[in-house]
């Protein structure tokens, strides 16, 4: 694709690169639904999206492009991989570059980094967020998430230039017994904080309690039961996002503050050094 900036030294390390067809479908469904990602994509002058760390094959990058085009047909999707052996020729309107958290010098309106930071140490998360944030187009967003090998359990944070703004958990209604089972797939910034006394632990405990209280609706299926659990969470004061449409997945989405986050510049001085927009 014409117009790529000159190459810069990639920031990051090579990770395992495992991937698979439709592994990120639950996250993609939420990204193209009503919410900040869809709104930002529709408002963008240049709808450039970077899929960071797509792995050994770019199948999920192509899937992302197909789904985003339903929202914005002129979206430009670039897959970025730090391992040069994984960079493939572009096709079907999708291009590929070598790059890491510096995003190959691109300035996207959306970055999806799934199953990337999961493989880093916890202390690397803040600097990685700051580096990506520095490259965002004004108003841009980052999706930092993790899922299991089949995409049945997913969790992701949406961040803007100030830090995390929301946390979402999404899971297969028929293969997950209770909400806290998704904890094993929390993003790196949260997975080690799922202990008593931490907000993320309290959120998962509250979700399990609401799920248990909604057990009388189990004969109607897990989706109906989870809708009732969301109502109970909201009634208990948890600021859950309520979805009007029927959902294929069970989804729990809350503001980042509910998981214990503060603005990124307070967590990581690197963002202040880079400069906030």
Image (cartoon, rainbow, N blue to C red):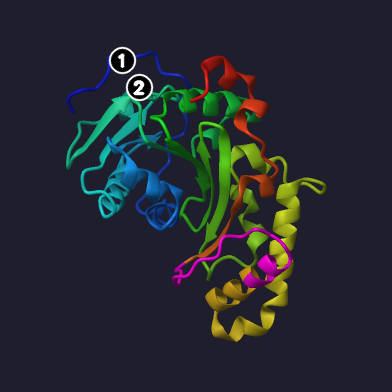
As displayed, is residue 193 above or below residue 97? Answer: below
Q: Residue at x 67, y 77 (%)?
A: 214
- Residue 220: x and y in percent read 55, 84
Q: Which numbered disc, 2 or 1, marks the residue that appears first in the sequence?
A: 1
> Which residue is farthest right?
197
Q: Is residue 157 left or right of residue 109?
A: right
Would residue 267 be counted in the magenta stretch? no
Q: Is residue 274 visible?
A: yes
Which segment is the magenta one? 231-248
Would residue 239 be counted in the magenta stretch? yes
* Label 1 CA crowd tier, 10 Å (few <14, some 14–19, many 20+): few
**Which residue in the protein does label 1 denote?**
7
- Residue 260: x and y in percent read 70, 43
Q: Which mark is residue 104?
A: 2
Q: Quadrant of residue 271?
A: top right
Dominant SS type (magenta): loop
Residue situated in front as seen by the camera: 272 or 93: 272
Q: Residue at x 70, y 40 (%)?
A: 192
């Amino acid at each position: 694709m014409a117009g790529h900036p000159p190459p810069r030294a990639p920031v990051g390390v090579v990770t395992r690169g495992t991937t698979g067809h439709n592994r990120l479908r639950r996250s993609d469904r939420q990204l193209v639904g009503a919410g900040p990602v869809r709104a930002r994509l529709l408002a963008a002058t240049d709808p450039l999206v970077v899929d960071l760390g797509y792995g050994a094959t770019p199948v999920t990058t192509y899937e992302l492009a197909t789904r985003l085009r339903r929202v914005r047909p002129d979206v430009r999707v670039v897959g970025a991989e730090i391992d040069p052996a994984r960079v493939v020729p572009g096709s079907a309107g999708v291009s590929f570059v070598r790059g890491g958290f510096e995003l190959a010098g691109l300035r996207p309106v959306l970055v999806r980094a799934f199953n990337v930071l999961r493989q880093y140490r916890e202390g690397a998360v803040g600097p990685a967020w700051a580096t990506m944030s520095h490259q965002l187009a004004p108003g841009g967003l980052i999706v930092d998430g993790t899922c299991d090998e089949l995409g049945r359990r997913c969790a992701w944070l949406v961040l803007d230039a100030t830090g995390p703004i929301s946390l979402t958990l999404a899971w297969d209604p028929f293969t997950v017994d209770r909400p806290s089972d998704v904890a094993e797939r929390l993003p790196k910034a949260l997975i080690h904080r799922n202990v008593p006394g931490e907000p993320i632990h309290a959120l998962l405990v509250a979700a399990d309690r609401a799920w248990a209280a909604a057990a009388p609706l189990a004969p109607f299926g897990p989706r109906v039961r989870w809708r009732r659990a969301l109502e109970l969470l909201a009634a208990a004061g948890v600021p859950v996002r309520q979805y009007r449409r029927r959902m294929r997945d069970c989804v729990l989405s809350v503001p980042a503050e509910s998981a214990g986050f503060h603005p990124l510049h307070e967590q990581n001085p690197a963002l202040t050094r880079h400069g906030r927009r």
